[in-house]
Amino acid sequence: MQRANGNTELNVSAMVTVASIVEGNGEVAAVPVLLRRLAAWLTPQTAVQRSPPIRVRRDRFLHREEDFRKYVLLASAKAGKVGWILIILDADDDCPAALAPRIAEQAKTLVGHKRVSVVLPTREFEAWFIASGRSLDGKRGFNLDAIPADPEIYRDAKGWLHARMRNGYREVTDQPAFSAGMDLEQARANSRSFRKLCDDWGRHCEQVRA
């Protein structure tokens, strides 16, 4: 397509709505930022409409059937006919490879016609910041001494960041800021769970275009 001034505009071949379920106020602000960047990086020809994330309490969502049903159905309604549901929860001490398929299967029993992706950062969302730490060094008072061999090993990734930030780590403000500034390729290279997010993103957007 052409702009009025004659410059060529990128053809958009499809549009997809992503309805996300998250935990924590930090994720409510950070996930839309991250998804916008993923769309521009991985699927620039797919227009992505991101509805505001649905915030849940992790334990209640996972262990109370009525809560799980309520929020999955709400996400399904937000996703519309061709959208997909993205559930992002901290893995904590659970094994992501075991828990994520169980959550996805349970969701499918409620919305079998919808695409569902479950991504569990190991062990916390902030592990993705550790994985991309070189790109965040110097930002918001963060001082990187060294990236650990396994960025996803820390049970308290927030604490790891807090100890290396001049004014400490503030989830509500620092999480969206780091999501906006992190190197996505660096995170994908160093984090298995972030690679899953990237893979799921590409697969679901490709299905919409097909």
Image (tube, rainbow, N blue to C red):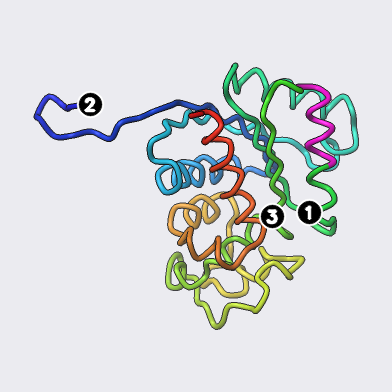
What range of the chain is rendered magenta?
A: 102-111
* Helix, strand or loop at mark 3: loop
The furthest residue to the bottom: 145
Q: Which residue is mark 1?
A: 96
- Mark nearest the camera among 1 and 3 is 1
The amino acid type, in three-letter code, at marker 3 is Pro
First of labels 1, 3 by sequence position? 1
Dot 2: element: loop
Q: Which mark is residue 127?
A: none
Q: Is residue 184 above or below residue 74?
A: below
Main SS class of the magenta portion in the image: helix
Foreground tag (1 vs 2): 2
Disc 1 residue type? Answer: Pro
| Residue 159 counted in the magenta span | no
Q: Which mark is residue 1?
A: 2
To which residue does mark 3 refer? 121
Q: Residue at x 65, y 31 (%)?
A: 85
| Mark 1 → mark 3, Cα distance in angstroms | 8 Å
Q: Quadrant of the N terminus?
A: top left
Q: Does dot 1 land on a helix, a strand or a loop? A: helix
Report, in whole angstroms, how far the alpha carbon at label 1 lies from the one at label 2: 43 Å
* Residue situated in front as seen by the camera: 21 or 44: 44
Residue 199: % across, % down: 59, 48
Q: How many marks?
A: 3
Q: Give the quarter of the image for residue 75.
A: top right
Q: Dot 2: within a 10 Å radius of its alpha carbon, few (fewer than 14), some, or many (20 or more) residues?
A: few
